[in-house]
Image (tube, helix red, strand yellow):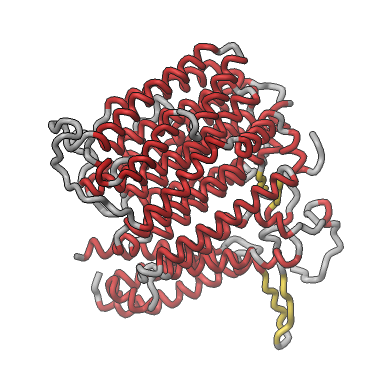
Amino acid sequence: MSLEKTSVDIAAAMITDPTAAKDWLLVTPTLLTMLGGAIALITRKNVRLQPWIGITALALVFCANIALLNHVLNDGVVTMVMGSWLPPFGIAFTADPMGAMFATFASLVALCTGIYAAGSIRPEERRYGFYPFLLMLLCGVSGAFLTGDIFNLYVWFEVLLISSFGLLVLGNKKRQIDGAVKYSLLNLLGTTLFLLATALLYGLVGTLNMADIAMKAAHLENQGPLMGVALLFFLAFAMKAAAFPVNFWLPASYHTPRIVVSAVFAGLLTKVGVYALLRVLLLLLPAGHNWMNTLITLVAILTMLTGVMGALAQTDVRRTIGYLVITGIGSMLAGLAVASEWAVTGAIMYAVHSMIAMTGMFFVFGYIGKLQGTFSLREMGGMYRRSPILAAVSLVLLFAAAGLPPFSGFWPKVLLVEGALDKGMGWLAGVVLLTSILSIICVGRLWIYVFLRGGSQSIADGTMVALPQEKQKLPATVWLSVFPIVLMVVYIGLQPDAVMSFAHKGALTLLDPSAYVESVFGVAP
Amino acid sequence: MNTVIFRTVAPFLTALMTLFSIFVLLRGHNEPGGGFIGGLIAVSAFAIYGIAYGVAGVRRALHVHPMSIAASGLLLAVASVLPSLFLGQPTMTSQWLEFSLFGTHIALSTPMFFDIGVYLVVVGAITSIALSLEERESD
């Protein structure tokens, strides 16, 4: 091996222009979470230090994401290719408005989870590595939102899956193992399908870079095999996103782990599936999307309806919220099915709303469940007297989940209904509205039972009280984790402009990939 | 497996295999090998030691908890992608430091440190799994 410097023209294979330091913001969320996770893992025996390390790292990630969002807002889609290799050979990280926004809200949710967990996760569970797992989960989620390479997306899926297995069995109860087995089996199956579809796609177009796929797939002579690939991707990501009929793992597993774990799962995991669906079906394989439009519409409708009916039928609060998550997924899929500019905006906004609102709901009802010692709707009650502020907060979150104004769930639904009507899919708009009405019944029932009813099922409303009466003071960790979320829910409800315009930019980038491609390759397609 | 022969040979075998794993790790830059396979060889070494002297013996010999080894590997791997930040290059761009030491040419590079990080992650994680599996069997 000769060690002399060779005189090869490296500009043909490598990036030689200097990279601005602010482009490093793209990889900061993943690098920071890895660093924080490693430090938290080394110091996991020091259970009192754990929350501080975890929360500091999560707060830094959140700040970095805000900066990245700002960077994307000012300079458009941002790309950085690992190791200076020119795309499509180097692995690209590409942040478009949708990815940056999802990453930001995901880190907000994770930060709130870290704070809530400081008050609710027992010391021995901290020793088993709650904070390292949480940080690595966010690492996988951020990586998935920011990567511009489909195989790399698969790798981030694995990272977040493995962390989620760890979080799921925290506590070592028999029921948890049962939930974890169902969850992991279905998710491994989904991941395997994803890998198969990726391999087939690579065989067809010969590239893994998303921008490159978007260009090459459109010009492929034989479009037939691409349809099969698109269908496989749809199945794989529908499993992740908990779309009907491959969603039975969600209600079977979300009520078993610690409540704070359910909260972060409800906020992040299904949304990663929705993100992947939007990215792959709209940006990479729009032809495949058109081809199976009817199927997507059908899946969206059934997901919405089965979700809300499941929510109505449940008596366990955690299961009810689990089904409400599924209903929301149906609404996002409706946006994917319509696939017009404003409908996709609605789907992106709905995903953001669902991330924060569902996590907040698990926080609030988890805390109530802990106070009451039960999660069964039949036995809960009398919470209004014990904590009026909690009643107000949960009313906000429940209304948001049902899509009532003036909260964050309202605007995405408006956009979805409007988008569906514009495209002549009136019946889809009808189902969205019907789902909203059923959701209102569901959340109203939940609120009345838990807060207004004096005690458990047999006690008449408000007259007799079988439960302790004293006012409950909320611990600081609950305040600090729930209120940022509620403020965000109200803010998006009252001032939707900022989030909506950003989601709109994201939708435009998805539907017309030229800005995305230009960011990666430096030239318009 | 508690024969005298095995218990006598095991420490030498472990030392030899650990040495070989480092050789495989370092040759991985240009030839077959690397952090992952090197790490697996090292784990096999610890497993042999564990079969001969029990899990407690391995834990004593390692001094630090395997999970901490894995975490320090992750730290090293992340640290190795950072230098290019200060040179205005994208993440993971390799940086080289070449010098002569007593007439031997030495080339240090960030990919090498990344690979050492991978090695440590594999050693830590798989050892941790192997030890807890062996522990369950023995009690």
Please tell me which residue lies in front, A354 or A99. A354
**Quarter residue A447 falls in:** top left
Q: Is residue A436 left or right of residue A516?
A: left
Q: Quarter holding the C terminus of chain A?
A: top right
Counting from the top left corner in percent of width and height, residue A505 is at 68, 35
Q: Quarter holding the N terminus of chain A?
A: bottom right
Q: Is residue A66 left or right of residue B84?
A: left
Please tell me which residue lies in front, A520 or A188. A520
| Residue that lies at the very extreme toward the front in this rendered image | A463
**Quarter residue A285 falls in:** top right
Counting from the top left corner in percent of width and height, residue A446 is at 30, 32
Counting from the top left corner in percent of width and height, residue B50 is at 32, 70
Relative height, residue A221 to residue A510 (above, below): above
| Residue that lies at the very extreme toward the bottom in this rendered image | B102
Please tell me which residue lies in front, A42 or A478. A478
Instruction: Say whether residue B44 is visible.
Output: no
Residue drawn 30% across the image and 54% down it = A473
Please tell me which residue lies in front, B124 or A400. A400
Q: Is residue A312 left or right of residue A410?
A: left
Residue drawn 58% across the image and 56% down it = A63
Residue drawn 62% across the image and 45% down it = A100
Relative height, residue A389 to residue A441 (above, below): below
Instruction: Say whether residue B79 is visible.
Output: yes
